Image (spheres, rainbow, N blue to C red):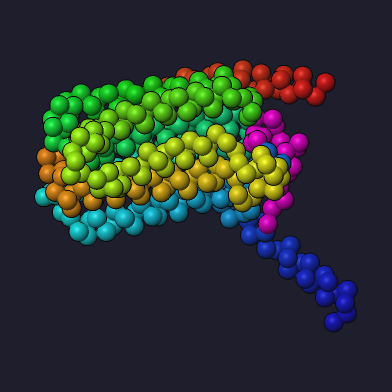
């Protein structure tokens, strides 16, 4: 065989491999629409306006969202693994703790699954990018609702549980929905500028209030421990870790480090948002463990969550948020136009 025909054979063989299995080229920041820019991420952007299958198959490609997608897919596997073991140990009809674990586990799976899908698909166009990230807020606030239910039934003391159980679930429901609107409006008003701090403040303010409401059921345990000389705060470490990780999440989300210090060096691996994703998964695991530990210590025998009631509440929350998103999405074209005008102004 001549070297010419060998070259042709190699070329033909490589050309016949389906495109999905080959590493696809990515674009530098300057070649994608301004609303798709991420702070200090200079490359690794997928090509916009391709068919949907390009974005679905980008799950197996290397680009600046690969780690964000996989971190939450792996997170779903971890949650499923933990739920599997809880089902092995408890009986749904007899052990109320399994209802609490299951409700919170479902909210985690929906939140993580939504986030993975959003990071996988949002690069198709500026409009899809805006709408996709508002879908992500449905997942995030849905998960916050699950955290509130976990806090009430999973690790509140009997007196607190008795005094708040009648109004707490509607309170978390309303605050989750209002926070969803807050996150969407922050995206619509300031989403055209990835460096805008007002958007970050609105995010952190909304999520902070939500987190405070979610903490309300177990704060009295810390107050009791403070007044009790025989109580050590270390006995509450399995709960203290939850707000601690939440604060780390907020810092990782807002700081965009280390990529701001090393622009262009963290385009594929090492972005602050990737760390934020890992911390979210860790926090879910710590919350499941806190429910389990307090059950094992016989502290939550008073909890009797109604699985079907809360499942319907979760479905209603998701549907209402999705319906609101359909209305808010009408504001997206104006927001994209604002982004284009601001970008043109900057280039002058
Ligand atoms: Zn994310």
Q: Is residue 13 left or right of residue 176?
A: right
Q: Residue at x 13, y 32 (%)?
A: 159
Q: Is residue 21 above or below residue 327?
A: below
- Of 231 and 287, nearer the camera is 231
Chain part drawn in magenta: 23-39
Where in the figure is residue 245, as x and y percent of width and height? 42, 42
Where in the figure is residue 100, as x and y percent of width and height? 23, 43
Where in the figure is residue 15, as x and y percent of width and height? 74, 62
Could you tell me if residue 107 is visible in this image? yes
**Residue 243 included in the magenta stretch of the image:** no
Q: Quadrant of residue 60?
A: bottom right
**Quarter occupied by the N terminus:** bottom right
Magenta stretch prevailing secondary structure: loop
Q: Quadrant of residue 344?
A: top right
Q: Is residue 99 above or below residue 166?
A: below
Could you tell me if residue 187 is visible in this image? no
**Quarter occupied by the C terminus:** top right
Where in the figure is residue 121, as x and y percent of width and height? 56, 41
């Amino acid at each position: 065989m001549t070297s010419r025909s060998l070259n042709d054979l190699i070329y033909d063989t490589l050309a016949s491999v389906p495109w999905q299995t080959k590493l696809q080229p990515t674009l530098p920041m300057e070649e994608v629409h301004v609303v798709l820019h991420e702070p200090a991420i200079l490359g690794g952007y997928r090509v916009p306006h391709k068919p949907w299958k390009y974005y679905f198959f980008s799950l197996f490609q290397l680009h600046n969202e690969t780690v964000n997608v996989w971190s939450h897919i792996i997170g779903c596997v971890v949650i499923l693994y933990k739920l599997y073991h809880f089902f092995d140990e408890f009986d749904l009809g007899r052990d109320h703790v399994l209802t609490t674990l299951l409700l919170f586990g479902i909210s985690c799976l929906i939140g993580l699954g939504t986030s993975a899908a959003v990071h996988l698909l949002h690069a198709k166009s500026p409009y899809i990018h805006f709408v996709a990230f508002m879908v992500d807020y449905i997942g995030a606030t849905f998960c916050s609702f699950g955290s509130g239910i976990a806090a009430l039934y999973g690790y509140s003391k009997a007196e607190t549980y008795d005094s708040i159980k009648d109004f707490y679930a509607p309170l978390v429901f309303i605050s989750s929905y209002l926070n969803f609107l807050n996150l969407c409006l922050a995206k619509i008003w300031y989403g055209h500028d990835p460096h805008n701090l007002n958007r970050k403040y609105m995010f952190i303010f909304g999520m902070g209030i939500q987190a405070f409401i979610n903490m309300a059921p177990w704060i009295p345990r810390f107050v009791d421990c403070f007044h009790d000389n025989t109580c050590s705060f270390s006995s509450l470490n399995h709960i203290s870790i939850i707000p601690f990780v939440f604060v780390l999440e907020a810092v990782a989300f807002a700081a965009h480090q280390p990529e701001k210090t090393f622009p262009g060096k963290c385009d594929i691996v090492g972005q602050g948002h990737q760390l934020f994703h890992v911390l979210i998964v860790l926090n879910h695991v710590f919350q499941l463990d806190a429910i389990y530990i307090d059950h094992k210590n016989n502290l939550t025998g008073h909890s009797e969550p109604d699985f079907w009631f809360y499942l319907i509440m979760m479905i209603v929350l998701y549907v209402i948020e999705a319906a609101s998103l359909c209305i808010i999405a009408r504001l997206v074209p104006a927001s994209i136009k604002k982004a284009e005008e601001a970008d043109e102004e900057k280039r002058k």
